[in-house]
Image (cartoon, grey):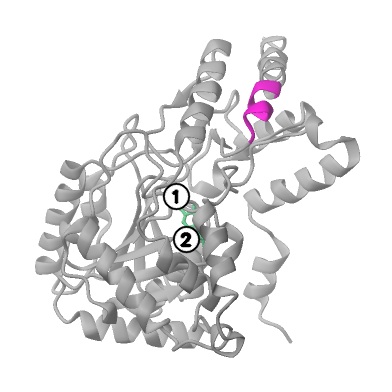
Amino acid sequence: MINESMYALGAAPSAIRELFAYGLARKAEIGADKVFDFSIGNPSVPAPAIVRDTVLELMDEDPVSLHGYSPAAGDPRVREAVAQSIRDKYGVPAQAAQVYMTAGAAAGLAISISAVTVPGDEVVVIAPYFPEYRTWIEAAGCTIVEVPAQVPSFQIDVAAVAAAVGPRTSAVIVNSPNNPVGAVYTRENLEALANTLREKEAELGREIYLISDEPYREITYGKEVPYIPAIYARTIVCYSYSKSLSLPGERIGYIYVSDLMDDPARVSTAVAGAGRALGYVCAPVLLQRVVQKCLYEPSDVEAYAANRELLAGGLAKLGYEYVEPDGAFYLWVKALEEDAQAFSDRAKRFELLIVPSDSFGVGGWVRLSYCIARETIEAAMPAFAALKESYEAEK
Ligand code: PLP
């Protein structure tokens, strides 16, 4: 016998990964330059030189200790350096004891959800949202509660969150800059959310955690990205170096339990327990040491900014509707028919790989990743034109 719900998860890859896998096969079949793959968020900017230099430097260390286990929560030197960087950058009193090194934000989120919920609880997400939230919430035995973002700003609809929070709510997940729409939540919006959650905590007599998923913190186009622990004390940050340092395959990030909440040590101990229960202990040690050297390294957002202009400008000329992104590297485009899956399927006929919005919790849109080669965006424009014409021809 196997666990049927795990079987179902394994048998049905995410819409993003399915399209990505299709793209790899299609490129092998007809040539990489003929497929316009906007499916996955694999950064196209190379990791900064300091990553390579640090790896080479570390190779001179004693291999036995270099490649050995670290404590479950991470190398104490790395945790201290991360805490120091949080103090320096955001002015909050971060302590190493509240930092838990993880294999990317994915592990951080799965751990954090497990740490602050019990089966039967509810976790609120803002739709559209990163599809794996559902997987991690349901794997923890909880129910996902979707709250649509405000349209067209895609800021958090705080009144709708208030209406969705109830006696079983343990956590709200926010993601700013946001995948898939590129929204960056304003300080006012986050303060309003924080006030509402504090009121709800008092009314319901229970703790509500804000889980802040932050892989895109540094990928912004001029907008302030407020530090949420400074706004809402009961915040758990899930940070990742996948996008900021272009290291998605290396699986490295951290959880930071805000020192400003009451009893952060107890929450950090639950994080350590959840990490242990899920088998997420001792994040890749070589990469822990690498990021220790890169904590103040800026992200290279120039290429994404240029791609954003090129893609958004090109689609605007063709008459597509989209949401202007303030951060991350995705464009949220209105599908040309109500059924986003059917639109994505038709786009495939033009070798355009674009992700339908349904698994993000809303219908009628598609997500285009523009962390890809500039030439691919340029070469894809005639295909976008032909896709649109195919709908116009039917009118
Ligand atoms: N959260 C969001 C919003 C993401 O877009 C991603 C990856 O694309 C993740 C979490 C997982 O990132 P990581 O590679 O750090 O596990």
Q: Where is residue 235, by image quadrant?
A: bottom left
Residue topped by disc 2: 133
Q: Residue at x 31, y 33 (%)?
A: 222
Amino acid type shown at disc 1:
Tyr
Q: Where is residue 59, by image quadrant?
A: bottom right
Instruction: Decide which of 138, 73 is in the foreground and name it.
Output: 73
Q: Residue at x 21, y 53 (%)?
A: 162
The answer to whether residue 284 shows anywhere in this view is no
User: Which residues lie in the magenta part?
Assistant: 373-379
Classify mark 1: residues with Cα within 10 Å, few (<14), some (14-19) or many (20+). Answer: many
* Image quarter (top left, top right, bottom left or bottom right) of the C terminus: top right
Disc marking residue 162: none
CB under 8 Å between callouts 1 and 2?
yes
Disc marking residue 129: 1
Q: Was residue 377 drawn as part of the magenta stretch in this picture?
A: yes
Instruction: Decide which of 316, 117 is in the foreground and name it.
Output: 316
Quick check: 357 left or right of 237?
right
Amino acid type shown at disc 2:
Tyr
